[in-house]
Image: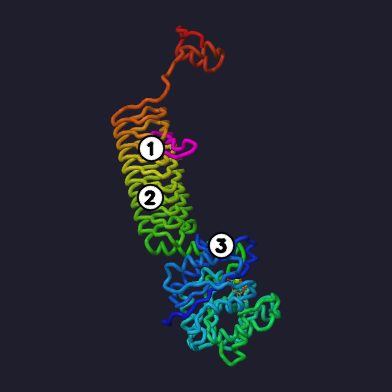
Amino acid sequence: MHSPPDAVIIMAAGAGTRMRSRHPKVLHPVVGRPLLGWVLALAQELQPAQIVVVTGGGQPDVADYAMSWAAGAASDVRCAVQSPPQGTADAVRVGLTALPRSITERPGATVLILSGDVPLLHREQVDNLLGAHRQASATVLTTRLAEPLHYGRVIRSGAQVAAIVEARDADAETAAITEINTGIYAFDAPSLVAAVAQITAEPPSNAQGEYYLTDAVAILVAAGRPVAAVLTEDATAVMGINDRAELAAADRIMAARIAHGWLAAGVTMIDPGRVRIEPTVTLEPDAVLYPDVHLAGATLIEADAVIGPETTLTDCRVGARSRVQRTTATGALIGADCAVGPYTYLRPGTDLGDGSKVGAYVEVKASRVGVGAKVPHLSYIGDAEIGEGTNIGAATVVVNYDGVAKHRTHIGTHVRIGSDTMLIAPVTIGDGAYTAAGSVITEDVPPGAMAVGRARQRTVPGWVMRRRPGTPSAAAAAAGAGPVDTVAADV
Ligand code: UD1
Ligand code: MG
């Protein structure tokens, strides 16, 4: 094992023009977490004394995001503003200004350079880099690509690196080199300070007019300080994200990586390629995920719960053995042994007691559904309490909004709400009460009462034969019932 790096500098100030976005490149998400978040998470795992994120001048949201990581971190996390961004050497120069001299001036101190746009990097790859670095002035993490594209080419001199040449500055022979620079390096701190000072002393003369960090290699070699390289076979993990196609590819790879981690932890997936689990989610062994499940935020899925197909859960808890299918839910607590879906929408503040059921085409918001209670079909439940064992008939609506304010509804235990009941809030239905189907309930119902709030039915015999003669309905009525003599008055 190696010791942790003394400092990590994360370069995140680049304009990201190839993204064609109004948003900073490093805040584009991969499986729900910004590119920069993945890099920060890895940097923190390494437990350096200092982490510096280099952000652009016009990117306050990048700095805010970086600082949101600082709160719970063991390392000291700070931002350094590079304005304007003038290339990776300039970014590192700015990053170094945020480090104490006890690091920058100490021979043998290690500064690890990461890019904010390389989210798939493995801990193991960084460990190998740091392990190999030891006494070199710099060690570059490289990989091989059959199509090296826009990556910097690594010019070797035996086991050492002689130089890195950017694709745009490469002649045909250099462009044919397949070993490329990943943009991840370990540097001896004083060597880095000296090389970066030299690069940024004169205006750049390369194709992009930028100060290239990659020029540090040739500078150190010329000064008689060898530069080492560690070649990683996993080229996918060191992929830099520069455009939307690469972002989409990284997202798919990360989603698969996370899914396979949970498979190994005992979660069943019917089709792992069609499951997206954000890194903030927790699943217990024997949870089962059907295809097209998206689990986001602080979601917890307990043992033997069956989720999906076609279900998106954000910041939800699903209790053991519950079944949640074709559901969109945010901020919902679902107890054990519940049945939810299909086509169900659970909004924040939903709290479903153990063994409860919320069925097809039901929306619930800021409501508690008691233990064993059922809302099986076509209902809206908002700002309500539903007691244990209560059944809500199909097409019931809690009318919680009077156009100005929301009001609460209390429904007791073992209540039977008839189908198509409108409960005009605020209203209380006592324990064990019933409402008649089709009722509009505007007044409180005491325990055990039956409330009927609808017009009494009127039936006009023979109306169809008289008023719709010659229609199929009239014929059907005549055949079924025979002539109807009783004639009501003038309907
Ligand atoms: C860089 C390397 C290239 C390597 C590739 C790997 C240089 C000159 N080239 O090229 O050899 O193969 O990464 O992905 O270093 N950044 C700043 N400030 C700047 C410019 C960039 O902070 O002024 C940041 C970017 O936000 C990004 C990282 O540095 O996170 C890399 O910059 P980018 O422009 O993507 O460099 P590449 O052209 O990909
Ligand atoms: Mg890049």
Q: Position of residue 461 (x, y in %)?
A: 46, 12
**Mark 3 or mark 2: whose residue is earlier in sequence:** 3
Colouring convention used in this rendered image of the protein: rainbow
Q: Which amino acid does label 2 sit on?
A: Leu
**Mark 2 and mark 1 residues within 8 Å of each other at the beta carbon:** no
Residue at the extreme bottom: 224
Residue corresponding to mark 2? 333
Q: Which residue has dot 1 on it?
A: 409
Q: Nearer the viewer, mark 1 or mark 3?
A: 1
Mark 1 closeness class: few <14, some 14–19, many ≥20 residues within 10 Å: many
Identify which amino acid the numbered label 1 is placed on.
Thr
Query: How far apart, in angstroms, are the residues tagged by discs 2 and 1?
Result: 19 Å
Residue 134: say if magenta. Answer: no
Which residue is more in the foreground, 384 or 165? Answer: 384
> In the image, is the residue at mark 2 within 8 Å of ligand 1 by its beta carbon?
no
Q: What residue type is labelled 3?
A: His
- Lower position in the chain sequence, tag 2 or tag 1: 2
As drawn, the label of residue 28 is 3
**Percent position of residue 281, x then y:** 42, 59
Chain part drawn in magenta: 393-408
